[in-house]
Image: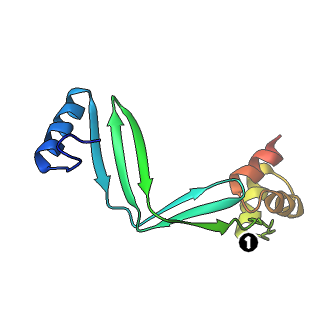
Amino acid sequence: MFPGGGKFNPRMMKQMQKMMKDFGMDAEDLKAVKVTIELEDTILVFEKPKVQVMDMLGNKTYSITGKAKKVAKAEEKIEDVEVKVEVTEEDIEMVSSQCGVSKEEAKKALEEANGDLAEAILKLGN
């Protein structure tokens, strides 16, 4: 593949780098510790990979070399957690006086707005 009996010498490497640069290509080795690729049903994990990024006229291509481990993808479960906001008496009085409503109405509006004063006032203002 390489001239010179298949041996690769540093001078050839410099010539190749110069040719690549002339064609608008630039290559750089990255010091990656771990690379993870998430697929639909599995995850590929490369420990201590050799990663090279090649920039060709603004388009970057990443090359990863190393041994990959396949890891089963765990299903992520997101639980809805209901948070109860404690409404203070000061907030109730402020909303009540701003909107001219009873304290019970102000408290209900604050609870529906999760304690957000501005939202409660806007709800009662309509």
Q: Which residue is mark 1?
A: 88
Residue drawn where x is 83% and y is 63% of the image: 107
Quadrant of residue 93 within the rendered picture: bottom right
Tell me the crowding category of disc 1: few under 14, some 14 to 19, or many 20 or more residues within 10 angstroms, Cα based. few
Q: Is residue 22 above or below residue 43?
A: above
Q: Is residue 4 above or below residue 36?
A: above
Foreground of the two, 121 or 46: 46
User: Residue 119 at x, y = what percent?
Assistant: 73, 50
Residue drawn where x is 85% and y is 54% of the image: 101
Foreground of the two, 124 or 40: 40
Q: Amino acid at mark 1?
A: Thr
In the rendered structure, the answer to whether residue 88 lies left or right of residue 7 reads: right
Q: Is residue 53 above or below residue 43?
A: above
Residue drawn where x is 72% and y is 68% of the image: 74
Q: In the orientation shown, which residue stands out farthest toward the left?
A: 11
Foreground of the two, 49 or 96: 49
User: Residue 90 at x, y = what percent?
Assistant: 70, 68
In what quadrant of the picture does the N terminus appear?
top left
User: Residue 58 at x, y = what percent?
Assistant: 35, 31
Judged from the image, the secondary structure of the residue bearing numbered disc 1 is loop
In what quadrant of the picture does the C terminus appear?
top right
Residue drawn where x is 40% and y is 67% of the image: 33
Q: Is residue 59 above or below residue 79?
A: above
